Image (cartoon, helix red, strand yellow):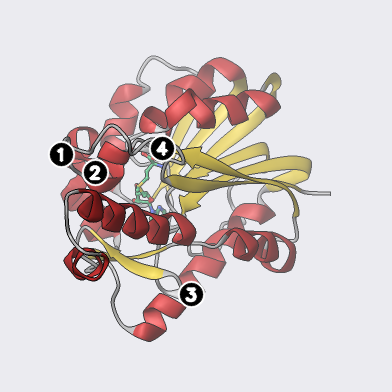
Amino acid sequence: MDVHYWNEFADEYDEHVIDAFTYGRSKMIGQQVKRFASLEKDVADFGCGPGKMLPYLSEKFRTVYGYDFSDKLLESAHKRCADLKNVHIEQADLSLPVDHLPMVDVIVSLNAVLMPDPELRMNFLRGMASRLNPGGYLILNVPSVESLLFSYFRETEWYRKEGSSPREAEERVDASYIIQPNRTAQGVFIRGTEPTKHYLREELIVLAREEMKLEALDVLKMDYDWKIEMEDDNVPEWMGEPYPWDWILIAKKS
Ligand SMILES: C[S@@+](CC[C@H](N)C(=O)[O-])C[C@H]1O[C@@H](n2cnc3c(N)ncnc32)[C@H](O)[C@@H]1O
């Protein structure tokens, strides 16, 4: 999932990518942003892509910075924010040192720290935390390992309810997201065509403390609809709560 991958995606991004800000149930990301928003604070979106959240942040903060390494996605972000005077968009590879980026009071990052390479991932996480002012907050949205396995469980139940035996139902599940065992052990699963890092709840708490030197305040579930997770409009009515979810880590710099 390098810059070329994201550049190639740019034209179809709005149509095909299910972003957390737009598609999360209960507008959870917006709710969490509101908790820490103020017109006296500055915010940055790390991995802003085409900038879907930037207009919302622009209304709620003094200054908004949007960073991404994909020049094509940033073109969309520029268009979206053309009239927003307090939004500053900059190309940056966030897995490289980010000491030149301004310090802010709140950082939001939605499904951007997905790279399977652990060094690039840790650099991104540490760099991001380093740009927070003391007392600042991080809102980090990432895919959940637990949710992915729970979805397999629900899919199995679906087949059983359709008449398959328990054993047949387990065999019918398309487990093609799961690749080599050592990748699975690290929470890396194939989504679409790409190996994508997923996180455990407890892993996020440890990463906040050990790598980002932040205090984890909450790890919240951000629910999606089953139709989105299963990529199937015929998901049965009974498949309601609990819904599939991403994790949202809320962490504070002391
Ligand atoms: C799934 S998209 C999410 C975009 C946006 N946050 C949203 O929710 O619509 C992941 C984004 O992370 C960006 N990204 C991934 N690795 C990056 C890196 N090392 N530096 C900067 N941006 C990166 C990609 O270019 C892409 O825009």
Tag 1 and tag 2, C-beta contact below 8 Å:
yes
Q: Which residue is mark 3?
A: 118
In this rendering, which labeled residue sits more in front, label 1 or label 3? 3
**On screen, residue 156 above or below 251:** below
- Residue that mark 2 sits on: 72
First in sequence: mark 4 vs mark 1: 1
Q: Secondary structure at mark 1?
A: helix
- Judging depth in this view, the residue of 17 and 136 nearest the camera is 17
In the rendering, at what x and y percent does residue 61 appear?
61, 22
Residue 112 position within the rendered picture, expressed as x and y whole percent measured from the top left: 43, 51
Residue that carries the numbered disc 1 in the rendered image: 11
Q: Residue at x 74, y 40 (%)?
A: 136
Asked if residue 52 can be seen in this view, the reply is no
The residues tagged by marks 1 and 3 sit, at their Cα atoms, a distance apart of 29 Å
The residue that appears at 48% across and 31% down in the rendered structure is 88
C-alpha gap between disc 4 and disc 2: 20 Å
- How much space separates mark 4 and mark 3, taking CA atoms? 23 Å
Distance from mark 1 CB to nearest ligand 1 atom below 8 Å: no
* Residue 151 showing in the rendered view: yes
Question: Compared to 62, does 128 lie above or below?
Answer: below
Is 185 placed left or right of 74 in the picture?
Answer: right
Q: Amino acid at mark 3?
A: Pro
Q: Amino acid at mark 1?
A: Asp
Q: Which mark is residue 153?
A: none
Q: How many numbered marks does the figure carry?
A: 4
| Circle number at residue 20 | 4
Of residues 246 and 95, the one nearer the viewer is 246
* Element marked by disc 3: helix
